Image: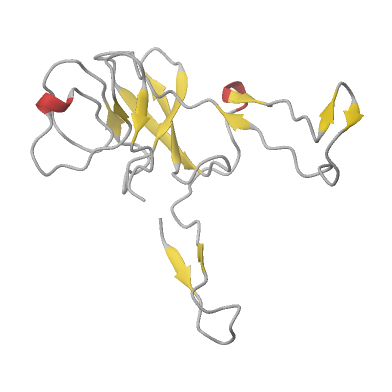
Amino acid sequence: MPVKVYKKNSAGRRFSSVDTFEDITKHRPEKSLLSKPTRRNGRSLGLITVRHRGGGESRYYRMVDFKQQKYDAGAVVLGIEYDPNRGARIALIQYEDGTKSYILAPLNIKVGEKVLSSLNKIEAKLGNRMPLEHIPVGYFVHNVELQPTTGGKFGRGAGN
């Protein structure tokens, strides 16, 4: 993720930086993988209990597949997207059977690359998912499961 660092023109600009969004290739989310969480807006039973909580833009939640339990089925990266609910980028992938899914995008993954999830030893490359015992020493890991088949809980920054 490229980062733009501002010049120190004033005290407010000192130490400030923003994402440049150059790595994003897809700007509209996949509608079948969206859900809209309910917002309470400071209300309990319809009565305002906390003030100054109204309005705001509704944010859709992208359903990210942290388990990736389609083993030994190849998938192709269709696009890299921005997710307002997390710091890491997400990648839209399409499996060989046509189903689409979001995964956490590893750093420097490109559109069109193939990713694979397997319980056996496979080639260690960007986006492949396998048990820790098969990953070479010194290789970058993210989205680590603490218990088998529970989904990734640790290291979800994916290269941040």
Picture quadrant where residue 156 is located = top left
Residue pictured at 21% horizontal, 43% vertical? 140
Q: Nearer the viewer, residue 127 or 76?
A: 127
Please identify the residue farthest to the left as the structure is shown: 137
Residue 32 vertical placement versus 123 (above, below): above
**Residue 44 location (% of width, % of height):** 83, 25
Report the colour scheme: secondary structure
Q: Nearer the viewer, residue 73 or 62?
A: 62
**Residue 106 location (% of width, % of height):** 33, 41
Please identify the residue farthest to the front as the structure is shown: 49
Please identify the residue farthest to the bottom as the structure is shown: 9
Residue 26 vertical placement versus 63 (above, below): below
Residue pictured at 83% horizontal, 43% vertical? 55
Residue pictured at 52% horizontal, 79% vertical? 14
Residue pictured at 14% horizontal, 16% vertical? 120
Q: Which quadrant of the rendered structure holds the N terminus?
A: bottom left
Picture quadrant where residue 154 is located = top left
Residue 119 vertical placement versus 101 (above, below): above
Image position of 124 (left or right of 72): left
Q: Nearer the viewer, residue 94 or 64?
A: 64
| Number of numbered discs visible in the structure rendering | 0
Image position of 9 (left or right of 66): right
Picture quadrant where residue 110 is located = top left
Image position of 101 (left or right of 160): right
**Residue 52 location (% of width, % of height):** 84, 47
Residue 68 vertical placement versus 5 (above, below): above
**Residue 125 location (% of width, % of height):** 19, 36
